[in-house]
Amino acid sequence: MNLQVSSIVDVILDRSPEELIGGVLMALVLALGLSGLFHLIRRKVSDTSTLIVCLALSSNLVAMTVGGAFVRYKFTGGRSLWGARSVEAPAPPPGIPGGRSGFIASRILESADLNGDRLLSADEAVFAAAQFVKESGEGGDSPLDERRLRAAIWARLGPHSSMGMGRDGPSRPAERPTATGKVGHRSFRNDREQSSH
């Protein structure tokens, strides 16, 4: 899927039900206004196709203005996007604890927590990151470019990430790597040095 299309899908999935209902109502109001203006003006204009194009462009401009105002108010508290130094994250949608970020954090913790204590140590994170690169690359310790990294994340989280499913459905416990003892003080640099010899 195209990056722009997936970004639009992410924005839609991140919206709360109230925001989605508000967007649908706004679209209905714009459609009713467009229909009313068309019926009022069509008798005075001989070329109806030009009238439809002008009304569609006007309603599109109104929709973009309302959408831009919503984004500015929601994410920057009314400040300009260019002048805002830090943008506050939107509130998570109801029904999913922590929203998409909470789901992603839960999946990362589930995959990387080797000893099952629901805490992610630095050693576990390094080991999980090294395993992720090895499983997602062309084999061995070959690095990932942006395209392969996006594909690997997509394969693990997939389009239904808000429902806890990846491209092939929910992950099964048997697919998780089993702990082979204490991870110890391993570092990613040491792993790369050993693999190069």
Image (cartoon, helix red, strand yellow):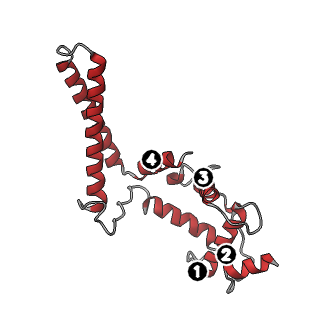
Q: Is residue 181 visible?
A: no
Q: Nearer the viewer, mark 2 or mark 3?
A: 2
How packed mark 4 is, by other alpha carbons closer than 10 Å (few <14, some 14-19, many 20 or more), is few
Instruction: Give the residue number, with chain letter if any, for mark 1.
Output: 121
Q: Identify the element where label 1 is drawn.
A: loop
Query: Badge 3 local density, few (<14 within 10 Å), some, or many (20+)?
Result: some
Amino acid at the residue labelled 1: Ser
Q: Which mark is residue 166?
A: 3
Question: Is residue 63 or residue 158 the one in the foreground?
Answer: 63
Instruction: State the separation of the CA atoms marked 2 and 4.
Output: 33 Å
Q: Position of residue 189 (x, y in %)?
A: 68, 80
Q: Quadrant of residue 20?
A: top left
Which of the two residues, 167 or 169, is positioned nearer the viewer here? 167
Task: Give the residue at mark 4.
Answer: 8
What residue is shown with label 2?
A: 127
Residue appearing at x 66%, y 58% in the figure: 172
Q: Nearer the viewer, mark 4 or mark 3?
A: 4
User: Which amino acid type is marked by label 4?
Assistant: Ile
Q: Quadrant of residue 186?
A: bottom right
- Dot placed on the residue nearer the N-terminal end, 4 or 1: 4
Q: Amino acid at mark 3?
A: Gly
| Coordinates of residue 129 in the picture (x, y in percent) | 64, 71
Identify the residue at horizontal 27%, vertical 38% (top origin).
61
The Cα–Cα distance between marks 4 and 1, rounded to whole angstroms, is 34 Å
SS at mark 3? loop
47 left or right, relative to 171: left
Examine the rendered structure and indicate whether residue 187 appears above or below residue 83: below
Relative vertical location of residue 122 with respect to residue 26 in this rendering, above or below: below
